[in-house]
Amino acid sequence: MSVLDLTQDSFDGTIASGTTLVDFWAVWCGPCKMQSPIVDAFAEKNPQVKVCKVNVDNEPALAARFGIMAIPTLAAFRDGELIQRKVGLSSMEEIEDMCK
Amino acid sequence: MDEKGFDILILGAGPAGVSAALTAHARGRSAAVISADPMASPLARAGRIENYPGLPGRSGRELLAAMVGDLERLDIPLIVGRATAVMAFNGRIMVSVEQDVYQAGALILAAGAQQNARPLPGEERLLGRGVSYCATCDGMLYRGKRVAVLGLGSGSEADRAFLEGIGCQVLYFTGTQAKNAEIQGQDKVSGIAVDGAVHPVEGVFVLRDTVAASALLPGLEMAEGHIAVGPDMATSVPGAFAAGDCTGRPYQIARAVGQGNIAALAADRYLKERET
Ligand SMILES: Cc1cc2nc3c(=O)[nH]c(=O)nc-3n(C[C@H](O)[C@H](O)[C@H](O)COP(=O)(O)OP(=O)(O)OC[C@H]3O[C@@H](n4cnc5c(N)ncnc54)[C@H](O)[C@@H]3O)c2cc1C
């Protein structure tokens, strides 16, 4: 499944149902560039999970709402509830565990 | 392969890293060395070196400058900056240096002894909760806020200037003040204690030349504070090798140079096996 870019307007509607993985990132962040292909590969392997990105520069309100203090930060939601959150670069296995 | 891709990436431009780079080069591999200021290696502080063959009575600084000069002589790229994260993915190893990412088929960790990476009080607990190792990665999240920069290695003035430039109010500490700082906060950073005074801050940038190897590459097996390696310098992460002081004692130039050579030969063999 392709990766969706979320905004303030689309965020709540998207995470409301099912399992969603959100990658908080920014263009100026080196480790985010390493996270991105792994998240893309996870999306490919796990079509049942909605995989999304939030650009913290364009969406400061979302970054503030989730208290993002370092990127990359990954957050997993189930039916609108935050179930897991991890700061720093995550491996494929770690992402799979987060979304279990 | 994109422009930032190499056969072998080497982390650290001390004796082990330079030796590994020379051997990788001799094997026809494209290699690049990533290092914080190479002249900040502990070797630069050594007086006369009397136990390294063929070059009697040189100072550590002279020896180090000659070694780093070998990289230039052979056009082996030296990328000066701090590596903050390493990740193996899809048969490649990626390394982030500030805002850039480099990748290779194999990695040689030659990052030196890790004693300088000993965490400060509060550092590990609050990592990612206000504690950051990378100003250019996380600085933007602290625009308009008060932060502390702890310059525990080389080059931290540039990070201070970067943070000020994007609108942070920066408290800057170096030397023993930085070494003895204590990071405070419950579930996120609230302040920093330096010389008995507590300064309220929302972020603390802890900037060392060395990031603890286990934090740099999650899953890397350690043994008593050093990177665990086999006889061919292979670590527990496929494609990642290690050499020099980061693998254990004695901390000596000759050992570092020898291990750098073994690691590069093993990395070359590893790549060859996967090419066929
Ligand atoms: C005062 C003193 C005297 C000494 N005298 C002798 C002697 O007489 N004989 C002898 O054999 N040995 C001596 N040594 C020991 C010798 O200096 C070391 O054994 C040798 O430098 C180890 O080489 P290395 O390549 O493993 O690591 P280092 O020389 O420590 O090089 C590691 C490099 O990696 C860089 N680095 C690490 N992490 C990162 C990162 N995350 N990002 C970017 N760069 C990174 C560091 O900045 C450093 O430049 C002495 C040491 C000291 C301090």
Image: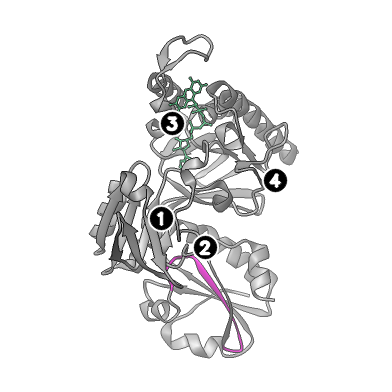
Where residue B21 sits, quadrant-wise, is: top right
Residue at (64% x, 43% y) in the render: B224
Determine the secondary structure under disc 1. Answer: loop
Q: Earlier in the sequence, mark 1 or mark 4?
A: 1
Q: Amino acid at mark 3?
A: Pro
Residue extent of the magenta highlight: A68-80
Alpha carbon of mark 4 to alpha carbon of mark 3: how far? 27 Å
The first of marks 1 and 3 along the sequence is 3
Give the residue at mark 1.
B134
Is residue A75 highlighted in magenta? yes
CA distance for labels 1 and 4: 26 Å
Asked if disc 3 and disc 2 are in contact, CB closer than 8 Å, the reply is: no
Q: Which residue is mark 4?
A: B236
Residue B158's disc number:
none
Q: Which chain hosts label 4?
A: B
Q: Which residue is mark 2?
A: A88
Circles 2 and 1, Cβ within 8 Å, touching? The answer is: no
**Quadrant of residue B176 within the rendered picture:** top left
Instruction: Name the image quarter holding the C terminus of chain A.
Output: bottom right
Residue at image point 59% right, 67% down: A40
Chain assignment, label 3:
B
| Direction front: furthest residue | B196
Q: CA distance from mark 4 to mark 2?
A: 21 Å
How packed mark 4 is, by other alpha carbons closer than 10 Å (few <14, some 14-19, many 20 or more), is: some
